Image: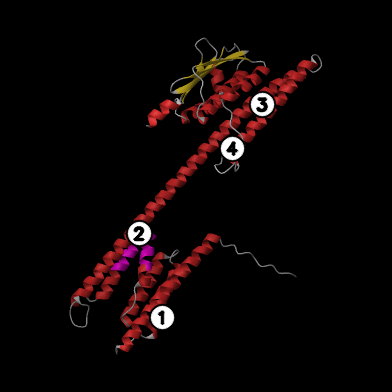
Amino acid sequence: MTEHALPDRRPPGRTRQWAVDAGIALAVTAAQLGGTYASNSWSGRHGHATNAWYVYVLLAIAGLALVARRRYPVEVLAVSLAATLAAGKLGGGFIWLALCVAFLNAAIARKRAAALASVVIGYISSTWPPWLIGRRGHASAAAAAGIAAWLIVLVAITELVRIRGQRAAALRRSQEEELRRRASEDRMRIARDLHDVLAHNISVINVQANTALHLMDRQPDRAKEALTAIHGVSKQALAELRAVLGVLRDGGPDGAPRSPSPGLAGLGDLLASVRSAELDVGLTVEGEQRPLPADADGAVYRIVQESLTNVRKHSGAASASVRVRYEAEGVSVDVEDPGSARSAPAERSTAAGNGIRGMAERVLELGGTFDAGPGPAGGFRVTAWLPAPQPDMAARADA
């Protein structure tokens, strides 16, 4: 029977963290032991006593404990403090590197009480008993002041590192929140585009399919025209769906869709498809036509598309009017239909709520205004204004 080794289920990030922690612990331990050995060699050459082997063991424990510093910051600090102080009492001439690293780690891990307690314990232990400072055989006043100054510098450096780390973490959180917000806006925009594309084209296909079914035997020529319209509308729908869904794929280095989004340039094709569905639509364009920003251009197209879709779905009107007006600082669009007796304006506003809400969100995101409700002469009216200043005005504003 063949035995298979179980795969390593530890996350790659966790493995890297342990490797980094082990490397830091080994480096600190080597520095401590090497520094102590060098100090012993110098002391031996000058006739002074050298540290015993157990001092090296204690310093090694203080350094190797840093392997678990990420998971147990307080415990590692306690072990390093105890081992370092014990080594100092037993032999003196020891290095504080492991204890400094453990102290810094605890402070960064938000264990400030434990870190400050270690400073107090270390100072008292180094100068104990404090009432004998300056006397023979005890710490001198200069040494006590030097230790206090060093500890103050260590605490200050640790606080600066901690504050900088907190600022970096806050910046990362802010960036992540911004990315989530943008992702949410993209999802909403894609959902609106899908709604507009599917609602419009499927409603046209439905009308044309009903026409073809009713006229298949009696008027085959008109049925053929309806089927031809279905073919054209479905082809257009597929192209628009590819453009919308292309945003979800890698469409290039800038993440742009693979095909251009519909705009006012495609308004003629849109109205042609609507007219083929037996809705007479008139178009009026006022003002000097000019290229619009992509967002405003696409929004106007979608507003006309969704408004005409709502006319077919929720109104018995046989006609509608579309007016696009270019202004100095923007563009406005009005879509109005006379309505019919079978569809009250209030009922239509409720029935078309999702589409109207989507149009309103699209306009408000671009800083425009939107209104939808009964028209002045009956029926229903959708009005929107979008900021789209002329290029020369925008240049003067930037200047």
Label 4 vs label 1, nearer the camera: 4
Q: Mark 1: which amino acid?
A: Val
Q: In the rendered image of this protein, does residue 385 appear above or below residue 30? A: above
CA gap, disc 2 and disc 1: 31 Å
Label 2 vs label 4, nearer the camera: 4
Residue 340 located left or right of residue 157:
right
The residue at 32%/59% (across/down) is 159
- In depth, the one of 107 and 263 nearer the eye is 263
Mark 2 residue element: helix
In the rendered image, residue 110, in percent from the top left (x then y), is placed at 37, 59
Q: Mark 2: which amino acid?
A: Val
- Is disc 2 in contact with disc 4, using a CB cutoff of under 8 Å? no
In terms of secondary structure, what is the magenta stretch mainly? Answer: helix
Residue that badge 1 annotates: 57
**Residue 383 in sight from this viewpoint:** no
- In depth, the one of 347 and 127 nearer the eye is 127
Q: In the rendered image of this protein, does residue 166 appear above or below residue 89? A: above
Quarter holding the N terminus is: bottom right
- Is disc 3 in contact with disc 1, using a CB cutoff of under 8 Å? no
Label 3 vs label 4, nearer the camera: 4
The residue at 56%/41% (across/down) is 255
Quarter holding the C terminus is: top left
The residue at 47%/30% (across/down) is 366
Residue that badge 2 annotates: 161
Residue that badge 4 annotates: 257
- Magenta range is 101-119
